[in-house]
Image (cartoon, rainbow, N blue to C red):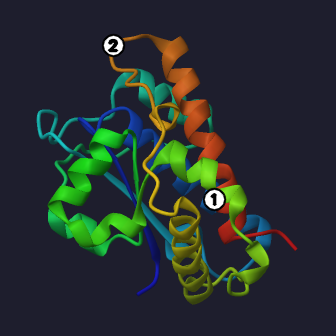
C-alpha cells in the first residue's frame, strides 16, 4: 500500500544508509514541489534505513555523513540508527543495500525479498535498461508513485536476469576515512537516487 517505501541498508546505519535515506527524501520533496501537486514528498515516498549490525543503535548520523547531507540541501536532524529487522524488510517495496554482503544478509533474513533487493550501484547500473514507456503512467499522487515504483522494481529485477551484483556496485565504507571519501560516496549515492526519483516522478 502507498506510500512507496524504500529501505536503505548498510552495516552500522550511521554513514551510507542514512545519507541515502535523507538524500532520497530531499530529492522526492524537491520533485513533488516542482510538479506542484497536492501531496508533499513524505506522502509520495517513505525513505528509511537500518544497519545489519546494532553497534550504533540510537546514535545520530556520523558527523561527516551529516555534513554531506546538509551540504546537499537535506537534513540529518532527528536521525537515530537502528538494527535491521525482518519487519522492516517485509514492509519495503524496494531495498537498496550498500554492498553485496548486505544483500546476502537481507535475503538470508527474508528470502522472499530477493526480487526487490539490490545493491545500490547494481540498481543504478540496471535502471537504464528499463523501458520507461512500459511502466504505469506517472503522476504526483501516492497511488501512482506506488504503482509505478512496484512496476519499476519488477522491471529492474527482470533486467538483472538472476545475475549477481558486480564488485564495482558496492559502496565503499567511508567510516573514519575523512570528508573526501564521504563526498565521493555521497556523490555515488546521488548518482543512483537522482535517476530513481526522476523515473518515479518525471517532469512533464
Residue at disc 1, secondary structure: helix
Q: Earlier in the sequence, mark 1 or mark 2?
A: 2
Name the residue: 35% across, 70% down: 92
Residue at disc 2, secondary structure: loop
Q: Is residue 202 left or right of residue 112?
A: right
Mark nearer the viewer, 1 or 2: 1
Nearer to me, 56 or 169: 169
Kindly indicate the quadrant of the structure image that contains residue 63. top left
Q: Is residue 31 above or below residue 77?
A: below
The Cα–Cα distance between marks 1 and 2, rounded to whole angstroms, is 29 Å
Q: Position of residue 11 (x, y in %)?
A: 25, 36
Question: For the residue carrying disc 2, how many other residues have a C-alpha within 10 Å: few (<14), some (14-19), or many (20+)?
Answer: few
Identify the residue position indicated by label 1 in the image: 196
Name the residue: 22% across, 67% down: 111
Question: For the residue carrying disc 1, how many other residues have a C-alpha within 10 Å: few (<14), some (14-19), or many (20+)?
Answer: many
Q: Is residue 56 left or right of residue 47?
A: left
Name the residue: 19% across, 48% down: 82
Q: Position of residue 112 (x, y in %)?
A: 26, 73
Nearer to me, 115 or 47: 115
Name the residue: 57% across, 80% down: 151
Q: Position of residue 90 (x, y in %)?
A: 25, 73
Tell me the number on the disc at residue 26: none
What is the number of callouts on the image?
Answer: 2
Identify the residue position indicated by label 2 in the image: 176
Residue 30 appears anywhere in the view: no
Q: Position of residue 75 (x, y in %)?
A: 49, 43
Amino acid at each position: 500500500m502507498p506510500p512507496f517505501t524504500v529501505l536503505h541498508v548498510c552495516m552500522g546505519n550511521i554513514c551510507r544508509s542514512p545519507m541515502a535515506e535523507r538524500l532520497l527524501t530531499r530529492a522526492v520533496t524537491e520533485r513533488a514541489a516542482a510538479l506542484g501537486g497536492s501531496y508533499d514528498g513524505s506522502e509520495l515516498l517513505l525513505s528509511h534505513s537500518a544497519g545489519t549490525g546494532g553497534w550504533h543503535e540510537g546514535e545520530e548520523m556520523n558527523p561527516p555523513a551529516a555534513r554531506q547531507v546538509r551540504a546537499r540541501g537535506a537534513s540529518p536532524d532527528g536521525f537515530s540508527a537502528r538494527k535491521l529487522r525482518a519487519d522492516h524488510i517485509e514492509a519495503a517495496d524496494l531495498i537498496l543495500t550498500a554492498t553485496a554482503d548486505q544483500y546476502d544478509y537481507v535475503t538470508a533474513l527474508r528470502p522472499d525479498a530477493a526480487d526487490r533487493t539490490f545493491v545500490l550501484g547494481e540498481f543504478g547500473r540496471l535502471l537504464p535498461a528499463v523501458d520507461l514507456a512500459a511502466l504505469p503512467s506517472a503522476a504526483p499522487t501516492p497511488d501512482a508513485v506506488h504503482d509505478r515504483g512496484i512496476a519499476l522494481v519488477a522491471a529492474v529485477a527482470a533486467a538483472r536476469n538472476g545475475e549477481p551484483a558486480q564488485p564495482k556496485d558496492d559502496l565503499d565504507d567511508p567510516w573514519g576515512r575523512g570528508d573526501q571519501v564521504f563526498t565521493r560516496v555521497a556523490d555515488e549515492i546521488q548518482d543512483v537516487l537522482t535517476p530513481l526519483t526522476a523515473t518515479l516522478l518525471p517532469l512533464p
